[in-house]
Image (tube, rainbow, N blue to C red):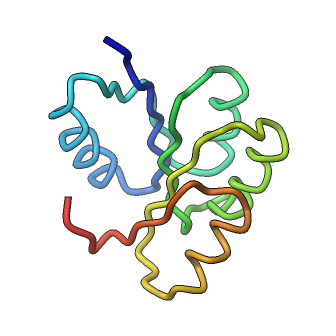
Amino acid sequence: MIVIRVIIADDHPIVRKGLKEILAEDQSIVVADEAGDGRELLRKVRENDFDVIILDISMPDLDGLDALRQIKAEKNTARVLVLTIHPDARYAVRCLKLGAKGCLTKGSAP
């Protein structure tokens, strides 16, 4: 069985915990790590290989858009899924232009 290694980057621990529980329902997905801000995410992405990065836009220290820009510059093949509180379509368009594979709002159904 192929295992998909995921890192979740969100500044809210409860969101990370909830996502981990949802993803744990699929045995082919393993949450390999977490990050609470953009700088921590960059460090972990540089040190490890993840199949998918789940990324929040609004984070302290380095926001998700800047983190996405740097990740794609360093690892162009990185697969990033943006999960955000911002329902405005402009955010989704911007994320996709920066190289995200998709963008969901936190109000989306699991």
**What count of labels does the image hold?**
0
Q: Residue at x 38, y 72 (%)?
A: 105
**Residue most toward the top?**
1
Q: Quadrant of the C terminus?
A: bottom left
The answer to which of 30 and 100 lies nearer the viewer is 100
Answer left or right for 36 relative to 40: left
Q: Is residue 110 above or below residue 87?
A: above
Residue at 62% from the left image edge and 60% from the top image edge: 64
Which image quarter: residue 27?
Answer: top left
Q: Give the x, y percent position of residue 41.
A: 61, 41
Give the quarter of the image for residue 87: bottom left
Q: Decide: is 70 above or below 49.
A: below
The x, y position of residue 17, in whole percent, is 26, 44
The structure residue drawn at horizontal position 69% and vertical position 39%, both measured from the top left corner, is 42
Q: Which image quarter holds the N terminus?
A: top left
Q: Is residue 60 left or right of residue 82?
A: right
Residue 107 as seen in the image, left or right of residue 9? left
The residue drawn where x is 65% and y is 31% is: 45
Quarter holding residue 22: top left
Relative to 54, is 60 above or below?
A: below
The answer to whether residue 30 is above or below residue 86 is above
For this orientation, the residue located farthest to the front is: 1
Q: Position of residue 74 (x, y in %)?
A: 83, 38
Residue furthest to the right: 73
Looking at the image, residue 77 sits to the left or right of residue 41; the answer is right
